[in-house]
Image (tube, coloured by chain):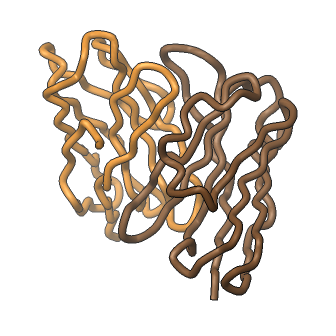
Chain colours: A orange, B brown
Amino acid sequence: DAKTTQPTSMDCAEGRAANLPCNHSTISGNEYVYWYRQIHSQGPQYIIHGLKNNETNEMASLIITEDRKSSTLILPHATLRDTAVYYCIVSFGQNFVFGPGTRLSVLP
Amino acid sequence: DAGVIQSPRHEVTEMGQEVTLRCKPISGHDYLFWYRQTMMRGLELLIYFNNNVPIDDSGMPEDRFSAKMPNASFSTLKIQPSEPRDSAVYFCASSFWGAQTEAFFGQGTRLTVV
C-alpha cells in the first residue's frame, strides 16, 4: 500500500503557482520523498526528490516539513502542459509504490 | 540514449493466446521494473530485477504471468494464456542502484485482450 495521502484533484490557473500537498506521516528516517507525474497515456516522469532539505530544480520545488510528515510540490508558473496526475512516493531504494495521486488541471 | 524502449506500443489479442511484451532499458542501468496500470487499480509494481536477477515478483498476479531478463539490455513479460482482465497498460522502467534514484519509464504497451 502507498504510504502517502494526496488530494484527489486540484485546479490551478495558468501562470499561477500550483501547490500540491502530500501527507506521509509514517515516513521512516531513511526514506526519500519522490514526485512523479503522468501526462495522459504517457509513462510516469520523474520530477524531484528530497530527504529533509528543500529542493529545487528546473521543473519544480519541493518543500518538506521539519518533522518530514508532509511535503508540498510547487510548480512556480503552471502551464497547460502541466495538466497531469502527480504522484507523491516515499521510498528507500528502488521499490516505488504509486498511490492514486492528484489530478492537477491547469485552466486557461 | 533513447530512453526505455518498449514494444509493441499496442497489442490486441484474443483470449487464450500468448502475449509477449518487450523492454530495452537504458544502457548502464542495473534495475528494471515492470508495472501494470488499470483504471481500477492504478499503477502496480509486478516485478523488478537487479543485474538481470529477479528480486521481488510478489506483484505478479498469477502463474500465467512470467518475466525474464536474459541480459542487461532486454527483458520480456509474458502472459500465457491471456484473459480479458489482463487488459491494461504495461510499463517498463529502469534505474541505477542507489538509495535515492529516479526511475525512467518507457511509453508503455497498451494490451487489449478480447
- Which residue occupies the foreground of this view, A79 or B22? B22
The C terminus of chain B, quarter of image: bottom right
Name the residue: 73% across, 74% down.
B10
Name the residue: 71% across, 67% down.
B80
- What percent of the width, then of the height, locates residue B56? 54, 33
- What percent of the width, then of the height, locates residue B74? 84, 41
Figure check: A87 above or below A42: above
Q: Residue furthest front?
A: B63
Name the residue: 32% across, 69% down.
A107
Name the residue: 57% across, 75% down.
B87
Figure check: B40 above or below B35: below
- Which residue occupies the foreground of this view, A108 or A10? A10
Q: Is residue B18 left or right of residue A89?
A: right
Q: How many marks?
A: 0
- What percent of the width, then of the height, locates residue A21? 20, 41
The N terminus of chain B, quarter of image: top right
Figure check: B44 above or below A21: below
The image quadrant that residue B95 belongs to is: top right
- What percent of the width, then of the height, locates residue B108? 66, 59
